[in-house]
Image (spheres, helix red, strand yellow):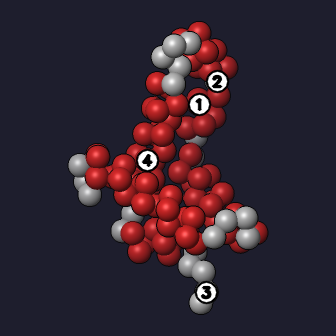
Amino acid sequence: MATLSVKELMQEFGFQIDDIRWHLCSEMTKRFFAYREHPEGLTRLLWSGAIEKDLYDMEERFLRGLQEDLDRGMTDEAHVRQIFHEVRRSKKRRGRG
């Protein structure tokens, strides 16, 4: 059985690129809340400009990275499906699922 591409899996799950973007933003929000006890760490992160770099084309880079990992055999379809189930949960919390 041939492994599906990330694009094909996105179609199977009925995802738009915006669903991936929402999920990644949700994960970033969790990362920010982890700084609750150390606000100076968040200040340094914001000051460094790293957030701007992370946000730029984040969904395309994320999907491209998943596909590259699949192509290299560093991950498998089951793992990508697991990630997409997390994306589906984010989409439902958003109120569009």
Inspect the image, locate mark 3, and give the three-letter code of the amino acid beneath it.
Ala
Relative to the observer, which residue lies in front, 21 or 83?
83
Residue 39: x percent and y percent?
53, 11
Q: Which callout, 4 or 2, points at the residue further toward the start of the chain?
A: 4
Query: Gap between marks 2 and 3, in whole Å?
Result: 41 Å
Q: Name the residue under label 1.
A: 52
**Crowd rating for badge 1 (residues with CA inside 10 Å; few <14, some 14–19, many 20+):** few
For marks 4 and 1, give the one nearer the viewer.
4
Q: Split into 4 quadrants, where in the image is the C terminus?
A: bottom left
Q: The residue tagged with tag 2: helix, strand or loop?
A: loop
Tell me if 14 is positioned left or right of 6 in this view: left
Q: Residue 2 carries which label?
A: 3
Q: Image quadrant of residue 73?
A: bottom right
**Crowd rating for badge 4 (residues with CA inside 10 Å; few <14, some 14–19, many 20+):** many
**Crowd rating for badge 2 (residues with CA inside 10 Å; few <14, some 14–19, many 20+):** few
Query: Gap between marks 4 and 1, in whole Å?
Result: 17 Å
Query: Gap between marks 3 and 1, in whole Å?
Result: 37 Å
> Is the C-beta separation of discs 2 and 1 under 8 Å?
yes
Inspect the image, locate mark 4, and give the three-letter code of the amino acid beneath it.
His
Q: The residue tagged with tag 4: helix, strand or loop?
A: helix
Q: Which callout, 2 or 3, points at the residue further toward the start of the chain?
A: 3
Residue at left 40%, top 46%? 22
Query: Gap between marks 2 and 1, in whole Å?
Result: 5 Å
> Is the C-beta separation of discs 3 and 4 under 8 Å?
no
Q: Which mark is residue 23?
A: 4
Inspect the image, locate mark 2, and give the three-letter code of the amino acid beneath it.
Gly
Query: Gap between marks 4 and 2, in whole Å?
Result: 21 Å
For marks 3 and 1, give the one nearer the viewer.
3
